[in-house]
Image (tube, grey):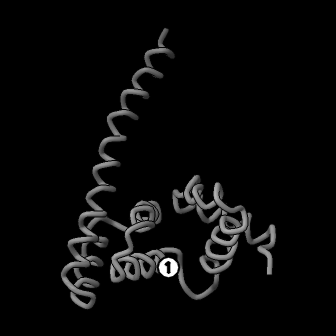
Amino acid sequence: MPVTETYFEKGLKQLEIMNRSGTMLEQKALSEDVYRYSVGFLFGEIWNRPHLSYRDRQLITLAANIALSRPTGTPNHYRSAKALGISHEEIMELILHVGMYAGWPCIAHACNQYTEVLEAEKAKKPARRASARKTATRRKR
């Protein structure tokens, strides 16, 4: 069953809400169908079902990824969690809680991935500030 345009558009909008626009492009490069199913079905249909909030769904997704020590995808979900208002403290509590059930190596793996995300965010901030200063200087002229 092909992904409808409605679900695909809902999926693109959902990715925007989660600060994930422009992700999964490697899928798109390999197969338009894989990309459309990921965007349309997963983010357009599943993420927009009733009964759970986006925040709840993000916590569940992170918990599953942490428990399974997923090598890819999880860093994007840490970014999405932040975009959906989940705090650093809540993310750390989630890592700790899941790790008690899934095993200590899951905690180590999750902490490594989350640290990489935080370091990447920190590296972007000075670049953004420098860009903003240049823009402000140009406006003064």
Residue under the point 28% across and 50% down? 119
What is the total number of numbered labels drawn onto the structure image? 1
Relative placement, left or right, of 90 versus 37 is left
Q: Which quarter of the figure has residue 75? A: bottom left
Q: Which quarter of the figure has residue 17? A: bottom right
Which residue is outermost to the top? 141
Relative placement, left or right, of 13 versus 87 is right
- Crowd tier of the residue under label 1, counting other residues whose Cα lies within 10 Å: few below 14, some 14–19, many 20 or above: some
Compared with 120, 107 (above or below) is: below
Residue 20, horizontal then vertical, whole percent: 53, 58
Q: Which residue is at the front of the view, 102 or 136? A: 102
Q: Which residue is at the front of the view, 47 or 37? A: 37
Residue under the point 68% across and 76% down? 41
Q: Which residue is mark 1?
A: 57
Q: Which residue is at the front of the view, 117 or 33? A: 33
Q: Which residue is at the front of the view, 72 or 31? A: 31
Type of amino acid at the residue the image marks with label 1: Arg
Compared with 78, 26 (above or below) is: above
